[in-house]
Image (tube, rainbow, N blue to C red):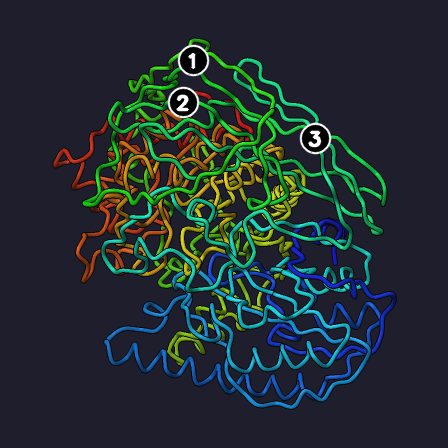
Amino acid sequence: MNPYEIEHNAIVRRFGAECAVLLKRDGSFPLAAPCRLALYGSGARRTVKGGTGSGEVNSRCFVTAEQGLEAAGFSITSKAWLDRYEGVWRKAKKGFIRRLKHTALRHGTLAVLSSMGAVMPEPEYQLPLDGAGEAAVYVLSRISGEGSDRKPIPGDILLTETERRNILALNRRFRHFLLVLNVGGVVDLSPVLEVRNILLLSQLGAETGSILADLLLGKATPSGKLATSWAAWGDYPAVGCFGRKNDTHYKEGLYVGYRYFDSVGKAPLFPFGFGLSYTDFSHRFIQAAEAGGTVTVEAAVNNTGSFPGKEVLQLYVSQPRGRLDKPFQALAAFAKTETLQPGAEQTLQLCFDLRDLASYDEVQACWILEPGDYALRLGSSSRDARPVALLRLDGEAVLKKVKNCLGKPDFPDWTPHVKSEAIPEGLPVLRVSAADFATEIVDYVLPQEIDPMAARLTDETLCLMNIGAFKLKGLQSVAGNAANTVAGAAGETSACLTDLGVPALVMADGPAGLRLSRRYTRDETGAHPLEGSMLESVMELMPAPAALAIRLRDRAKQTTGEIHEQYCTAIPIASALAQSWNLDFARQCGDIVGDEMERFGVHLWLAPALNLHRDVRCGRNFEYFSEDPLISGKFAAALTQGVQRHPGRGATVKHFAANNQETNRYNSNSQASERTLRELYLRGFEIAVREGQPHALMSSYNLINGVHTSQRRDLIQDVLRAEFGFRGIVMTDWIVAALSGRGNKYPGPEAPKIAAAGNDLIMPGCQGDLSAMLKGLQAGTVTRRQLQINATRILRMALELAGKRQDS
């Protein structure tokens, strides 16, 4: 391994345990020393480091649970079981792929198009649990990915009968038994709640197995907290719908995740913000203060147990319910301690801006704070937060006047009867005057600069600047492998101005690290991937002759020219990273990615992704941080800050917005109210822009209230640029014309309409986009001036990231 690989993996291993959430414990872990260990489960040998699709990262090596435990000195006594399970899995996978291909054939399509991201449910089987030892570990894995949603069936969200039977048998048989969840999303654990020790390890990148071993031996202590509520499948709300082909109704409004559970008084299995440690903590409120709209709560955390550890304090606010309906509480701030030795204490400050609690009033088209008492609630999870102070606002404060611009659904938002709770007497009261808040009026008339260079371009060159660099790449563009300069990168901007000193911008995918080809050759035409020129999850769905042809082509390339390497570090998936509640670790992960971008010549990382966990069935929840917009926005901003501390490197926050299902993802219409969109689904993006100012943003595939997000000028120009203050470039997600619009209620997006919306760049680009753009320019669908404005943003970003002085 190269020195940078060693250094980066060491960082992931050192801090990765902070992402692990201890859900149950009985004191039998950590173990005093390595021992004979019976190891079982789907993830014991087939441990998952991250999801599929754009989430795949080509690291040099990956430590499985089995490898990590053996390297730590454990003697695995269940090798025969692991070998037999491998045979079961391979047979089941072969049959699963065959069925996908047969189904696609019956429908006149290819499995690689119709079944992208499809994941085989865990199979049922009968294998004797014949391992012995002083302890046992069952590693339960699930994987999901881009292109397909999860299902509430055994082997996916639900446990199989085999898993339930084996887990409960091991729990009864072994005094030291640990159920390890190597998953990227929720699994219904209600059938195995009698298990005494449960660890949500999650998917922590290349060092997943090593981190597990460190946790078992107490070399590291789990200090993660849930960033999504874990409930029994039947307890999730069924108010809105999910996974419909055409229209998905967000009828639940604001009541997503803990906002639902806490408001209706329904207890999940494990609540938002919950997480145990090997030690115990207590906390005490010290004081609360308000100055200039900033609220600060000070509290002390004490380690009352016998192990070192870290604790997270969380501050929630229950708002007065006036004209506008509101959930029982919402997260306003959080803070994590340093490692506290037994008996040690640390004082934390939890701060938030009162303006960030504002509700959106659709009638007045403004953000307001309603008068009344705001209860400040302090705790270590959403369910144990208790009132510590009141903030009393003497009147309605109108904070920002905007305009309704996102359309209307054909239904009203659902509003439950929100539980009430008596506030204890004697709490300190912070009095705030509504008159202290100024009203901001958003100016939607923005400067539209045109660079002299863009003004001189021909119509065709202008169109090319608004489209990604393209050549005939076939399915490699679908898989996000359309770049020419860097092997395996997702795409590039046009190189049509390189003679004028404007470089092409190279973009790489991978929300859990850079996704590039491991090995490649280079000639006068560019960089060429060797093995793995296509994603393995894509290759296995291709017709056998086509897959063989690609493998033979890749193999042939290895015989000519010098072979280069570009191994990247797999960091924890986003849902795991959010469980750390540690923004400094997120910045370090961004720093790892930024360093590798410098090494390999990548300008824009197509991450972080911060769509909300609206529904546990979303196949890409592992790429997203949380069900809460504050957590999502803060972690996206921290990753962005880490990446962009490297000159010439930028992050691309995505998918803007309301991209919460993979079913018919190119043409699914997310119907939601203006208030719901603004307070939940746009909120995280606003935080990421305000605190991180990413160099780029990617619009989503879906429609919002009947219009593709990539074509919504109100969303891109009015909300993103005018209201949020975004200064970077906007690009589309990788649009595939063959999959967009065909056989759907809504037509696919069109190149000239995308450009007219102020969406600067159509990716990955194709000849059809260029032809459509030229026709649209001639027809007046898009103006030459708008193309010049878009091109100005692109060329200036290219010059900025290349570190070149602009010469007009």
Residue displayed at 43% across by 14% down: 394
Taking 157 as reference, is 40 above or below it? below
Q: Position of residue 440 (x, y in %)?
A: 38, 15
Q: Is residue 645 visible?
A: yes
| Residue sitting farthest toward the left | 779
Whether 150 is drawn above or below 700: the answer is below
Element class at badge 2: strand
Mark 2 neighbour density, 10 Å: few (under 14) some (14–19) many (20 or more): many
Which type of secondary structure does the marked residue at label 3 adopt? strand
- Of residue 45 and residue 449, the one placed in the foreground of this image is 45
Residue 263 percent location from the top left of the image: 43, 44
Residue closer to the observer: 158 or 662 = 158
* Circles 1 and 3: CB atoms closer than 8 Å: no
Specify the label residue 352 is tagged with: none
Say which amino acid is labelled 2.
Answer: Leu
Do callouts 1 and 2 mark residues in contact (Cβ within 8 Å)?
yes
Give amino acid for label 3: Ala
Q: Outermost residue toward the top?
A: 435
Give the residue number, with chain letter if any, for mark 2.
369
Which x, y percent locates residue 240?
31, 53
The residue lying toward the viewer, choosing from 96 and 454, is 96
For the C terminus, the quadrant is: top left
Q: Earlier in the sequence, mark 2 or mark 3?
A: 3
Left or right: 262 as drawn, with respect to 583? left
Q: Using residue 513 as the reference point, say whether residue 623 is left or right of it.
A: left
Q: Which mark is residue 434?
A: 1
Which dot marks residue 299?
Answer: 3
Q: Are marks 2 and 3 in contact (CB under 8 Å)?
A: no
